[in-house]
């Protein structure tokens, strides 16, 4: 009888269901599958044999289908009697239990650990308020900022977090530290071989950029810009090859030789102008005894001559003691200022130059070799500096690039720096050239003089990067960073204006 029932059950598993339960779903046996010969069974008899209501059979079938879906998702074959998902479920429950236990232990231990201050803690911070306390002479004292704490302790220290309740017995009183010092220096780097730039836009806004790749390359030495100080004395400068030289637009010889007559003069801030090294003024050189006989037969003083070489022509001017080699621009300046000059420059044989003495009496060595190509427009004008060499750059809307910090002292078209753009979260350890003063420049655009006692405390172990004073000096200055200043107690913290 038992074997007959087992055979019948295996056949019933392949039968469709009949009847309807509470939710109108079919239950029970409706047809006979070929190959099986069970007893004659009706839907009601199947329900009675199941030993329960149709709802229980329906729930059992639903659980069966859900298990099959789980195996299908895992890509496993469903065994007939045991559940392979049991190990997965058990592992999940054990993991959740262990994680909960660890969190509970951490909360208990952490709460107990932060309720007291470690006796060897040199620097602690309140978890609730963020207040800092530094240990001085075996006593915790309030300190203004992390930089001041490092200066007092002599080296960078990471504060230990404690609860506010643990600081209840801490001595109150004057706050140690330097008002206005950086709250945290961040990552300090020495910018070796980094390009510095100070730029003016068309509206006169001034930006200092350090290591900014958006600043275009320097102009070639044969390009120039005519500028004047926006709030200066009216002097006009020819900016070329990283230099600036005063030019007199009212002098016809200078205007014609440089081809700047009628050119629009661009106003720039004194910050940008001062960042460009000044060269001697460009104009027609004064020649003593012009028109008188020189030491060369048939050549008067002030005469300009040319020698044709294989690569390019060379220009010379006759002076009282001999010949001086000059550039093409200086040659044109001399000719345009001499009413007796010939229409064309005389060409002489190289033999004449070879047998004549050479002198260097005229200060025209810094002049451009020829009239430069004048540039204008509304592009931003930048004075750049890299490894001791100055340059000039032009680019569109450099001061509007993202990542710039606008300073509190911004004055628009005034002489002050308006924005600073450098890597966020970093500070620069620099030494200005040529004064050799050491500074810490934060990403907020403020320079702090560094005392010798602060070098190790701030982690400035390496050699500082070299930076141009003409740009560094334009940044707002903060208080000097030193240990003696950090140990001063103050009832009221007032930053240096």
Image (tube, rainbow, N blue to C red):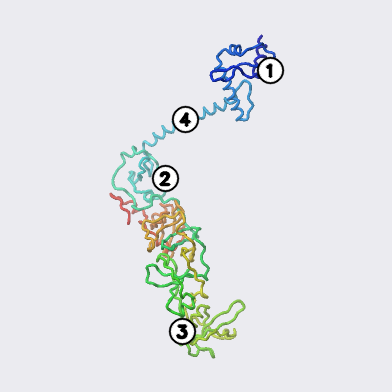
Image spot of residue 409 (x, y percent): 36, 58
Asked whether residue 384 is in view, the answer is no
Question: Could you give the CA–CA distance between mark 3 and mark 1, rounded to whole angstroms?
Answer: 126 Å
Q: Give above or below for 461 relative to 72.
A: below
Residue 19 seen in this snapshot: yes
Name the residue carrying label 1.
Answer: 33
- According to the picture, the residue beneath numbered tag 4 turns out to be 100
The kind of secondary structure element at disc 1 is loop
Closer-to-camera residue (350/37): 37
**Residue at the top extreme, as displayed:** 1
Horizontal side of residue 203 vs 56, given as left or right: left
Q: CA distance from mark 2 to mark 4?
A: 30 Å
- For label 3, the residue is 287
Element type at marker 2? loop
Percent from the top left, x then y, of residue 305?
54, 84
Q: Residues within 10 Å of mark 3 (few under 14, many from 20)?
A: some
**Residue of label 2:** 158
C-alpha separation, residue under disc 1 versus residue under disc 2: 79 Å
Quarter-of-image position of residue 474: bottom left
301 w.r.t. 374: above or below = below
Question: Mark 2 against mark 3, which lies toward the viewer?
Answer: 3
N-term mark: 3 or 1: 1
Asked which secondary structure carries label 3, the reply is: loop
- Check if mark 3's residue and mark 1's residue have beta carbons within 8 Å: no
């Amino acid at each position: 009888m038992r074997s007959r029932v087992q055979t019948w059950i295996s056949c019933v598993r392949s039968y469709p269901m009949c009847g309807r339960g509470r939710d109108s779903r079919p239950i029970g046996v409706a047809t006979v599958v070929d190959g099986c010969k069970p007893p004659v069974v009706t839907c009601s008899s199947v329900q009675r044999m199941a030993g329960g209501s149709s709802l229980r059979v329906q729930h059992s079938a639903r659980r069966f289908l859900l298990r099959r879906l789980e195996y299908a998702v895992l890509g496993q074959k469903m065994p007939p009697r045991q559940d392979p998902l049991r190990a997965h479920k058990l592992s999940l429950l054990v993991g959740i239990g262990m994680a909960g236990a660890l969190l509970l232990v951490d909360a208990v231990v952490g709460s107990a650990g932060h309720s007291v201050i470690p006796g060897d803690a040199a620097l602690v911070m309140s978890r609730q308020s963020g207040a800092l306390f530094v240990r001085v002479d075996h006593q915790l004292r309030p300190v203004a900022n992390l930089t001041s704490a490092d200066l007092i302790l002599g080296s960078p220290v990471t504060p230990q977090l404690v609860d506010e309740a643990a600081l209840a017995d801490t001595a109150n009183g004057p706050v140690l530290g330097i008002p206005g010092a950086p709250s945290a220096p961040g990552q300090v780097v020495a910018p070796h071989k980094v390009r510095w730039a100070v730029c003016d836009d068309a509206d006169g806004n001034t930006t200092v950029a350090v290591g900014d790749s958006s600043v275009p390359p320097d102009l070639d030495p044969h390009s120039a810009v005519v500028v004047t100080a926006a709030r200066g004395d009216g002097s006009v400068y020819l900016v070329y090859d990283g230099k600036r030289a005063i030019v007199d637009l009212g002098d016809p010889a200078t205007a014609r030789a440089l081809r700047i007559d009628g050119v629009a003069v661009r106003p720039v801030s004194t910050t940008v102008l001062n960042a460009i090294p000044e060269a001697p003024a460009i104009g027609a050189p004064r020649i003593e005894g012009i028109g008188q006989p020189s030491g060369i037969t048939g050549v008067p003083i002030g005469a300009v001559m040319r020698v044709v070489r294989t690569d390019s022509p060379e220009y010379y001017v006759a002076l009282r003691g001999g010949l001086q080699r000059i550039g093409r621009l200086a040659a044109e300046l001399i000719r345009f200022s001499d009413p007796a000059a010939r229409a064309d420059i005389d060409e002489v044989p190289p033999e004449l130059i070879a047998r004549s003495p050479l002198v260097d009496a005229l200060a025209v060595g810094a002049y451009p070799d020829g009239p430069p190509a004048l540039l204008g427009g509304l592009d931003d004008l930048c004075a750049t500096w890299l490894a001791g060499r100055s340059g000039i750059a032009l680019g569109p809307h450099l001061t509007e690039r993202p990542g710039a910090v606008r300073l509190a002292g911004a004055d628009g078209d005034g002489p002050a720096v308006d924005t600073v753009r450098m890597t966020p979260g970093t500070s620069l350890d620099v030494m200005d050239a040529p004064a050799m003063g050491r500074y810490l420049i934060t990403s907020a655009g403020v320079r702090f003089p560094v005392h010798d006692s602060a070098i190790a405390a701030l982690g400035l172990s390496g050699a500082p990067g070299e930076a141009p004073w003409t740009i560094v000096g334009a940044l707002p200055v903060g208080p000097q960073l030193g240990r003696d200043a950090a140990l001063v107690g103050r009832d009221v913290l007032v930053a240096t204006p």
